[in-house]
Image (spheres, rainbow, N blue to C red):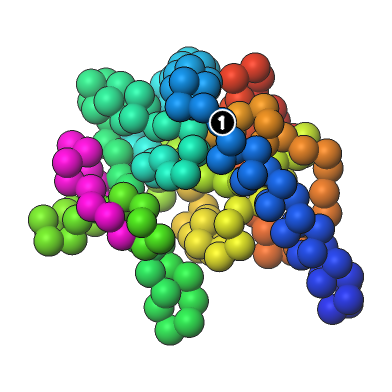
Amino acid sequence: MGNDNSIGTIRTKKALIRKDILKKRREMSPEDVKRLSADICDRFLASDEYRNADVLLLYKAYNNEVDTDIIFEKALSDGKKVAFPLSRIVEGEPDLSFYFVNDLSELTEGFMGILEPDTALSPQPFEGRADVCITPGVAFDGRCHRIGYGKAFYDRYIRLHRPGSIIALAYELQITSNFESEKTDIAVDAVITENAVIRP
C-alpha cells in the first residue's frame, strides 16, 4: 500500500473523517435515529441478501448507530438464526466470537458498554460461515470502503471467516467522499442507507 509515511497519512485522514462523522451522528435526535433506522432496516429486509439468509450476524446498536432491533425481531419471526458478537483482546489481537441470541434480554453490557451475549447464560456459539454479516462502521464511501472504530475487530473477523455477504447499515450523513484504504481494510458488499443501496 506504500511506505510508512503514506500509511500514516491514510490513518490520519481516516481519523479526521471518523471524528467528523461521529460528531454528526452524536448530534442526531432520538426521533431521527428511530425514523431513519426503520427506513434503513426495511430496505435491508427487502433485499435478496436477507431473503436468502439462514444465519445473520448482527450487532446491538450503540451510540446512535442504526438501530437493528427491527431486523432481529423480523429474522426470528421468519425462522432465521441470529448471532451477536462478543469482543475481546486475545494475545494482543482483536477477537470477535458470535453467539446465537433468541431474545434481547440475553444481552448484557460488555466491551465499551456495548450490549453483547451474556456468557453467564452459556449461549450457543456460532461456528462456520454466516450467510450475512451486518457490520457496524463510522463512515463509508461510494466504493463501499469502510472506516470503523479503529480497533479492526470486524476486519480481522471477516478476513478469517469470509461471510457470504457483508452489509453495512448507515445514515446518509455517514457517506463521505472516496478515501484511500489500507490493505488490511475490508470493503463491504453493500451499504444500505435511508435513501439507497450502495454497491461498489
The number of numbered badges drawn on the structure is: 1
- Give the percent coordinates (x, y) of residue 68: 40, 32
Label 1: few (<14), some or many (≥20) within 10 Å? few
Q: Which residue is mark 1?
A: 28
- At mark 1, the secondary structure is loop
Give the position of the N terminus as an image quadrant. bottom right
Q: Amino acid at mark 1?
A: Met
Left or right: 32, with 5 as reference point: left
Left or right: 175, with 137 as reference point: right
Residue appearing at x 12%, y 61% in the figure: 120
Residue appearing at x 49%, y 76% in the figure: 93
Left or right: 77, with 128 as reference point: left
Q: Can you tell which quarter of the image residue 97 is in?
A: bottom left
Asked if one can make out residue 85 in the rendered structure from this viewpoint, the answer is: no
Residue appearing at x 37%, y 27% in the figure: 71
Please name whichever residue, 188 or 9, is drawn nearer the observer in this view of the structure.
9
Asked if residue 168 is among those painted magenta in the image, a careful observer would answer no
Asked if residue 105 is among those painted magenta in the image, a careful observer would answer yes
Please name whichever residue, 13 or 189, is drawn nearer the observer in this view of the structure.
13
State the extent of the magenta-drawn residues as a range. 99-110
Please name whichever residue, 135 or 176, is drawn nearer the observer in this view of the structure.
176
Question: Against 149, is 45 above or below?
Answer: above
Question: Against 175, is 46 above or below?
Answer: above
Residue appearing at x 23%, y 48% in the figure: 107
Give the position of the C terminus as an image quadrant. top right
> Given the current orientation, which residue lies at the most extreme bottom position?
91
Question: Against 122, is 198 above or below?
Answer: above
- Give the percent coordinates (x, y) of residue 85: 35, 53
